[in-house]
Structures are given as structure tokens and as C-alpha cells.
């Protein structure tokens, strides 16, 4: 996946969970009573932090957990999110990164079209319901768009040459192979007793497609006669995957419990594992290598910025692992596609 194809959720991941730590400096002066944290000479109050959290809730559905322990961790993560945003805002200022109002307008309008069918009043009502304003939402969109531009300044033009591509293929050829896949028709019912009844009917020669259309509670596949298409083991939850891939072609499997209910079905086809060839996977592999190098450059640069920043946290907001940016849940900052936030 190229960096410009990454989703807005990837952008938010950088801002919220990527920054696994910002330095607490125990020798620094005492924080103001209402401060969640201080970045250089900028004090951020708990009220300001809460206001930004409401903007993220409006855009991305970021919701504070109700459980006390999870809520405390969420607030530490939220403080890290805003602190990294301020560090990156300063870097964007230094690099003279600018996002025109028209670009923010276009992104916001596309979001309203995608999420609210173009109904601006419904959008404004939704903002009111979560206690935020359109100005706050526009600020957040601008910040994320500036992150995209900043990334271009940091990682430059990543290119993967033929020798590097061939070497990576040799190292990863096993994982690049197409795994065994199976054609499956699956029936989902509510209870194990119902599943046992379906299994007896299949063992007696009943047509699985007809059974699925008649009794399956899986609305997504019922009208297709329970057809899951061609699936790999990893496409299925572990218990169902084991049952399906242990079954002989043409034979029933189950009952086995899955997330929607009890599963019984028939393996209709087996497509053997297909080894990878460089010609077939070259484009995908090149994009992966480019994304990995882009992430490496960004991580190294970001860690340097964090180590140079003067950041203090109040006790309730202090993060762990001050400079660890290795366990990002996404990749690198990317575009904010229209309509992605929700």
C-alpha cells in the first residue's frame, strides 16, 4: 500500500497511538495547576485537551471508555496525541508548510457529503451532540493535511531498485505465496441444536445452498446460498478456519461456533497453494518496501524531534516509553481522503 493510499485512520494513528512517549523532564519547573502538559513554552490545560478530544470524536468516532482504568489510559494517549501534534505543528511551521483554506473547505465538504448525504444541518447537529464546533473540526483537518505535507518534506522520494527488489523477494517469497484457498458454502444458525440438525441433513445428502437460503441467519450470504467465495484459512476465525480446512472436499464440516452463531457447511472446491513469482508480486512488493522505508525515515526523524522537545506532563497524563516510536498501529502520515473520518 502506498503512503498516499493510506486512510485517514492511518493519519490519526500517528497522532493518537504512535507517539508512545514524550519526555518528562523531572528537573523542570512545576506545571500550572490546570495543565495536562507543557510543550516547550506552551501550556495545555485539561479543558483544551478535552476540547480537542471532542473534535476527534466528531471526526473519527474516538470515544472515551467508561471503565476507569481504560479511561485513564485513554486520557494519557489523548495527551500524547495533542503533544505530538504541537511538536509537529512547530516542525511544519519551521518548514513553511501551508494548507490553503480552499483545501480544508474541499475536504470538509466531501466529509459532509459522504457521512451526512450533504445535509449540512445534520452535520452541525452532530457536532453539537458531541460538544464541538466546526472551527475545531476545521483546525483538526488542517493539522492532518499539514502532516501529509510535512511527511513529503521528511522522507523525500523513496525508490526501490531492481537489486533491492530481487533480494527482498528471495527473503519473503514464502510469505508472498498465495495460500491454499477453499470454496465454501456455509450455514449459520443460532444454537448448537439447530446446527446439529443441519449437519444431519447435509450428511443425508441435502443441498447446502438450499438449506442456507432457508435457515441461515447470516444475511450477508444467505441469499447466495451460503457462498463465502474462495477463502484462505486466515480469512476465517480460528475455530471455523480449522473446521473448514480439516474437511475433505465435498464433505460437510461443523458444527463449530463463530462470532455470529453456529456454523455448518460444505467445502466445494480446493485451490492449492501457489508459489510466488517475482513478475506477479513485483508491484505489490515494491509498494511495501517503499512504505517501509518511508516509515523508517519518518520514525527516525520523529524520534529526534521528540528528544529535542521540552515536554512535561502532569502526573495523570504522563506517558510511558518516552521515545519509543516502533510500535505504530498505522504506517506514516498520509492524505486525509474525503469522507474517511466518521
Image (tube, rainbow, N blue to C red):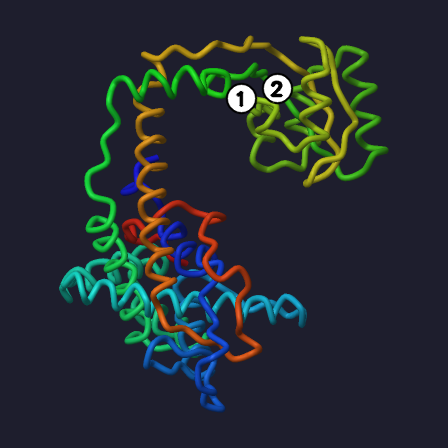
Q: Residue at x 51, y 65 (%)?
A: 77
Residue denoted by label 2: 184
Across and down, in percent, residue 336 comes to 29, 53
- Residue 128 lies, with reference to residue 56, above or below; the image says below
**Label 2: which secondary element:** strand
Q: Which residue is mark 1?
A: 229
- The answer to whether 175 is drawn above or below residue 147 in the figure is above
Q: Quadrant of residue 251?
A: top right
Q: What residue do we see at 49% from left, 58% from top?
A: 20
Choose top left, top right, bottom left or bottom right for residue 253. Answer: top right
Q: Earlier in the sequence, mark 2 or mark 1?
A: 2
Mark count:
2
- Name above or below for residue 155 compared with residue 183: below
**SS at circle 1:** strand
Q: Quadrant of the N terminus?
A: top left
The percent coordinates of residue 331 (x first, y second) are: 39, 45
Task: Please tell me how crowded label 2 is: few (under 14), some (14-19), or many (20+) other residues with Cα within 10 Å.
Answer: many
Which residue corresponds to the image point at 35% horizontal and 43% vertical from the top-left? 295
Q: Residue at x 69, y 20 (%)?
A: 244
Q: Are marks 2 and 1 in contact (CB under 8 Å)?
A: yes
Question: Is 261 left or right of 303, judged from the image as shown?
Answer: right
Q: CA distance from mark 2 to mark 1?
A: 6 Å
Quarter of the figure with the C terminus: bottom left
Task: Tell which residue pokes out farthest to the front in this image.
Answer: 27
Q: Residue furthest bottom?
A: 33
- 168 or 243, which is in the foreground? 168
Determine crowd level at label 1: few under 14, some 14-19, many 20+ residues with C-alpha closer than 10 A. some
Is residue 331 depicted above or below 81 in this figure? above
Q: Position of residue 165 (x, y in %)?
A: 31, 20
Q: Position of residue 195 (x, y in %)?
A: 80, 29
Amino acid at each position: 500500500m502506498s503512503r498516499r493510499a493510506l486512510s485517514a485512520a492511518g493519519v490519526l494513528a500517528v497522532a493518537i497511538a504512535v507517539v508512545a512517549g514524550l519526555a518528562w523532564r523531572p528537573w523542570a519547573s512545576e506545571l500550572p495547576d490546570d495543565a495536562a502538559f507543557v510543550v516547550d513554552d506552551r501550556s495545555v490545560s485539561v479543558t483544551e485537551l478535552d476540547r480537542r478530544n471532542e473534535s476527534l470524536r466528531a471526526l473519527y468516532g474516538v470515544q472515551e471508555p467508561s471503565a476507569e482504568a481504560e479511561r485513564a489510559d485513554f486520557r494519557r494517549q489523548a495527551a500524547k496525541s495533542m503533544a505530538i501534534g504541537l511538536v509537529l505543528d512547530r516542525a511544519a511551521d519551521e518548514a513553511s508548510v501551508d494548507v490553503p483554506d480552499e483545501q480544508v473547505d474541499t475536504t470538509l465538504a466531501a466529509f459532509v457529503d459522504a457521512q451526512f448525504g450533504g445535509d449540512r444541518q445534520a452535520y452541525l447537529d452532530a457536532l453539537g451532540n458531541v460538544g464541538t464546533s466546526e472551527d475545531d473540526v476545521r483546525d483538526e483537518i488542517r493539522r492532518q493535511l499539514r502532516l501529509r505535507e510535512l511527511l513529503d518534506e521528511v522522507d523525500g522520494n523513496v525508490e526501490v531498485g531492481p537489486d533491492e527488489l530481487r533480494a527482498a523477494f528471495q527473503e519473503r517469497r514464502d510469505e508472498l505465496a498465495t495460500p491454499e484457498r477453499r470454496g465454501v458454502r456455509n450455514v449459520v444458525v443460532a444454537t448448537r441444536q439447530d446446527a446439529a440438525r443441519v449437519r444431519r441433513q447435509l450428511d443425508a445428502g441435502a443441498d447446502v445452498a438450499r438449506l442456507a437460503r432457508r435457515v441461515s441467519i447470516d444475511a450477508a450470504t444467505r441469499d447466495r446460498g451460503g457462498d463465502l467465495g474462495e477463502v484462505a484459512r486466515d480469512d476465517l476465525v480460528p475455530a471455523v478456519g480449522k473446521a473448514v480446512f480439516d474437511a475433505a472436499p465435498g464433505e460437510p464440516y461443523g458444527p463449530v461456533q463463530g462470532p455470529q452463531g453456529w456454523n455448518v457447511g460444505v467445502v466445494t472446491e480446493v485451490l492449492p497453494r501457489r508459489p510466488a513469482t517475482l513478475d506477479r508480486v513485483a508491484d505489490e512488493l515494491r509498494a511495501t518496501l517503499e512504505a517501509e522505508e518511508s516509515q523508517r525515515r519518518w520514525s527516525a526523524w520523529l524520534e529526534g524531534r521528540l528528544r529535542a522537545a521540552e515536554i512535561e506532563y502532569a502526573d495523570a497524563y504522563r506517558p510511558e516509553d518516552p521515545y519509543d516510536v516502533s510500535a505504530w498501529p498505522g504506517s506514516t502520515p498520509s492524505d486525509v481522503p474525503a469522507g474517511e473520518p466518521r
